[in-house]
Image (tube, rainbow, N blue to C red):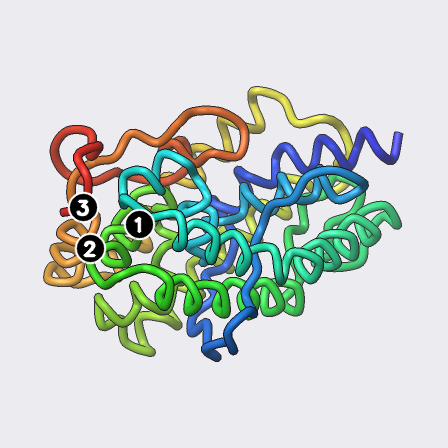
Amino acid sequence: MRIRSLLSGLMLAGCLASAVAPVVFGQEERPQRGQGGGPGGRGGPGGMLGGLGGMLGGMGGLAGTLGIEEVQKHLKMDETQQNEFKEARTSLQDDMRKIMEEMRGAAGQGGGQGGGGRGFGGGFSEETRKKMSELTGKLDSKIEDILDPSQFDRLLGLFAQQAGINALGNKHIVDRLVITDEQKSKIKELQDESGAKVREMFTGGGGRPGPEMFEKMTAMRKESEEKIMGVLTADQKKKLDELKGEKFEFPQGPGFGGGGFGGPGGRGNRGDRGNN
C-alpha cells in the first residue's frame, strides 16, 4: 500500500510541480568543468526517481528540455556537444537521486518534507527545493558553456514554451526579462498561496487522485498562471513572447512537457527548421 500510494503521488507530482511549485530564483554558482547534473537516469532503484526528475524539469533547469532528442536535433548539436552534455548531466545524477530518495523516504513515513503525508500532496520542502535549484543552476551554467550563443538563446525559448510560468524561476530568463526583486516577491507570494490551496485539497487524503482532482488542479493552474503573468509588465511579456520564438512541437508522452502544463507556447508554426 505504501508503494502504491507513492506511485500515485509521483504521477501527480508532474501536475503539482507546474501548478504550485514555488518559483526558485537565482540559481547561482557556475560549476567547474565536469560538474553538472540533472534529472533522469534508468535502471536500478533510481529508475522511477529519474523519471520524476524529468517531469520536474520545469522547476528551473534547462536539462529536461535539452535532454529531448528532437530538441538536440532542432539545435543542430554536434556529437561533441551531445557527449559533453551527457557527461555533465550524468555527473550530478547521483546527487539528484539522493534528493528523490530522501523525498520518497519522507513520503513513506507519512509526512516529513513539506508535510505531504501519505497523499504526497504537501509538495517539496524549502530545503529540497533549494538543493534541486542548486543542482539545476550548476547544470544550466554548464549547458551555456557547451552551446554556442544562438543555440543557447533558442534553448531558453524552447524551455520557456515547455515550462510555462515556472520558466520565470530560471536565472537566465529572469535576467533577460529584468524581473525586479519586488516582482520576485509577488510571484513567490502567489505561488505560496496556490500551494496552500493544494495542501487543503489533500488534507486527510491518501487515495488515488481521480479525474475530479485533476480537473481542479487544471483550474487552479490556470488561475495561478493568470495571476503570475499579471505581475509582469507589458514590455516583459513582449520580451518573453519574443524569447519563445516559433512554436516547437514537443513529443508527447510521460515525462515530456508537450505543453500540457507548460502554458502557452511560442509564435507561429512548429519550429523544426533549425536555429532562429
The answer to which image quadrant residue 10 occupies is top right
Q: Is residue 4 left or right of residue 272?
A: right
Q: Position of residue 36 (x, y in %)?
A: 54, 65
CB atoms at circles 2 and 1 under 8 Å apart?
yes
- Residue wearing tag 1: 160
Look at label 2 and name its amino acid.
Leu
Q: Quadrant of the N terminus?
A: top right
* Residue farthest along the top direction in this orientation: 211
Residue 240, disc: 2
Q: How many marks?
A: 3
Residue 275, disc: 3
Residue 104, disc: none
Estimate how packed mark 2 is, as few (under 14), some (14 to 19) or many (20 or more) residues with alpha carbons within 10 Å.
many
Quick one: SS at disc 3?
A: loop
Which of pointers 2 and 3 indicates the residue nearer the eye?
A: 3
Look at label 1 and name its amino acid.
Ala
Estimate how packed mark 3 is, as few (under 14), some (14 to 19) or many (20 or more) residues with alpha carbons within 10 Å.
some
149 or 118, nearer to the observer: 149
Q: Position of residue 113 (x, y in %)?
A: 74, 59
Estimate how packed mark 1 is, as few (under 14), some (14 to 19) or many (20 or more) residues with alpha carbons within 10 Å.
many
Up-down relation of residue 33 to residue 251 (above or below): below
Which of pointers 3 and 1 indicates the residue nearer the eye?
A: 3
